[in-house]
Amino acid sequence: MSESPIVIDVDDQDLSAATSGRFRVLIVDDDPDDVYVMRSALRLASSQLPGPLDVSVAVNGQDGLHTLEKLKNQGALPDVVLLDLNMPLMDGMTMLTHCRADSHFRHLTIVVVTTASDTHTAVKASALGASATYVKPSSRGEMVAVMESISEKYLLD
């Protein structure tokens, strides 16, 4: 039996993509296996969305900021950023800090998805402006439940 996803929610804002017709997600994670599982779980969870889902991927915080700049210039900022914390070159906490300091990105819904299950990490991410923190589950089924929760909360009306 699948357990409920562990989430520490810190922001009840509803930032639906319904007005654009497209739903955009940026995954920032350096582990290709985690990216694959998140992307496929997100695709399964997105069946409830009334429009197409676009998923972009960045391999670290530095690449994530660069990708956000490109998406901003294309007029296609993501509705949700799924952010890992432990990455080379620039970690997730640093990327989160940069996003919240930038007027173009401070409004973005940034959801931390990390292996860290301690409260200290979630509190720190929240203090830096994370919309929520989810603990990465160990099974694909549990990851689908996490992506469904994120889709319902941040992509649907």
Image (cartoon, helix red, strand yellow):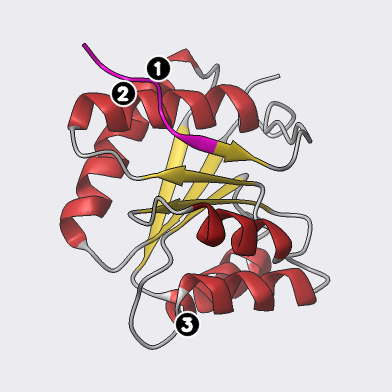
How many angstroms separate mark 3 from mark 1 (CA)?
A: 31 Å
- Tag 1 residue: 47
Q: Residue at x 36, y 23 (%)?
A: 145
Residue range in magenta is 1-7
- Tag 2 residue: 44
Q: Earlier in the sequence, mark 2 or mark 3?
A: 2
Residue 135, percent across and down? 39, 44
How many angstroms separate mark 2 from mark 3 (CA)?
A: 28 Å
Residue 127, percent across and down? 72, 62
Q: Secondary structure at mark 3?
A: helix
Q: Residue at x 70, y 43 (%)?
A: 10
Q: State the residue in front, 59 or 112.
A: 112
Residue 54 as seen in the image, left or right of residue 42: right
Residue 77 as seen in the image, left or right of residue 134: right
Q: Secondary structure at mark 1?
A: helix
Depicted 97 relative to depicted 35: above or below: below
Q: State the residue in front, 8 or 113.
A: 8
- Tag 3 residue: 62
Location of the C terminus (image quadrant) = top right
Residue kind at label 2, given as amino acid type: Leu
Residue 69, percent across and down? 61, 74
